[in-house]
Amino acid sequence: MTLSSNSKSAALAGAAALAACAYAWHLRKRLEREQRLRKEERKGRTRAEAALRNLSKQRDRIPTQSLRTRQVAAIGHVETPFVKRSGTPRQGMVCPSSRGVVKLDQAAHACLSRAALDGLEDYSHIWVLFEFHANTDMHFKAAKVAPPRGYGAKVGWLATRAPHRAVPVGLSLVKVDSVDAKNLHIHISALDLCHGTPVWDIKPYVPWDAPQSEIRYPAWVSRNDVLKGVRWESQALDALRKLAPSLLETYGFPTDALDDAQKTLEEVLVQDPRNKRRRKTRGPDGAGAGTGASYRIPFAGLDVDFRVDESRTVVVEAVALGAEDGDLLRTEVVE
């Protein structure tokens, strides 16, 4: 009798364990399916928003009689190593090694000739007025936004330099390296512009652009949220050197281009290019979650894989030729 009861108990326990394993397997598969569907839905939504953005741009080209609007054509565009929004510096001056070229379009404006650039080489810096062309929120309605250094606190969008705005126009101060009047090219550095950014105007920086009185700004603007440093795995650095000929034209001319490309990457990575969802929450002391996972950003035709360790140091794990995918606007998580 006891043996029979023990056998039944063992059978029931085995059946329960089997059922638990089956249920756990079912839950895991369901979770994987939900995660896959969420990823596909996000990609689909991004594609749809990009298509809407293009249609809206076509609509904006239709002449209008409103006195409050004016149809304008960009004077050119910028070529930079930052081929997508992910990995583009928030401010140019935190990435002084970055390089780019403003290419002016004479076909759009007859006044854009060599003579138009005469005297520009005498300035060290210029203001670039541009469009946030990679935005996908064409129907921006939010009155408040959460700036990266605000740690969740929201302020009015007019009190930030956020790209998401009612009129997606930006202003960037960049350094002038050289002026190629023959080809209507302006070589610049210390920039924060995506590849292909339309340029509406440029103006030289002059001393009185800087306020003569004391500057006032909120405390969150000056918070230091940079990571501790950047360390390269040996195979990643070797790959960068081998793939140097594959770098985009931006880093293809001077002999020190490879060193500058490495410096630019380090300046970008130490600013933590992971999006807020991946970084999770982090306080003003810099402590936070999201360490250990591998991430990927595109740079000058290459894909750069990295992780952030527990000491808040960026570890560059791998460098490879970049994949062409215009829909990946955010930092990609390496599976």
Image: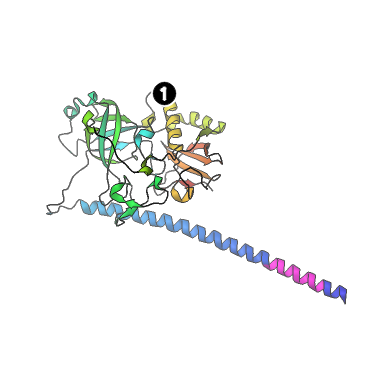
Q: Is residue 22 left or right of residue 286?
A: right
Rendered location of residue 63, percent (x, y): 15, 52
Q: In this view, does 271 lie to the left or right of 24?
A: left
Which residue occupies the foreground of this view, 320 or 305?
Answer: 305
Task: Pick out the residue farthest to the front.
Answer: 214
Q: Is residue 298 left or right of residue 177?
A: right
Q: Mark 1 points at which residue?
A: 256
Q: Is residue 156 above or below residue 218?
A: below
Quadrant location of the N terminus?
A: bottom right
Rendered location of residue 199, percent (x, y): 25, 39
Q: Is residue 204 above or below residue 150?
A: above
Q: Which residue is drawn at 45% across and 30% down?
A: 262
Query: What type is the residue that disc 1 sits on?
Result: Asp
Is residue 193 part of the magenta span, yes or no?
no
Q: In this view, does 140 lie above or below 221?
A: below
Q: Number of labelled discs?
A: 1
Instruction: Categorize mark 1 by other alpha carbons within 10 Å: few (<14), some (14-19), many (20+).
Output: few
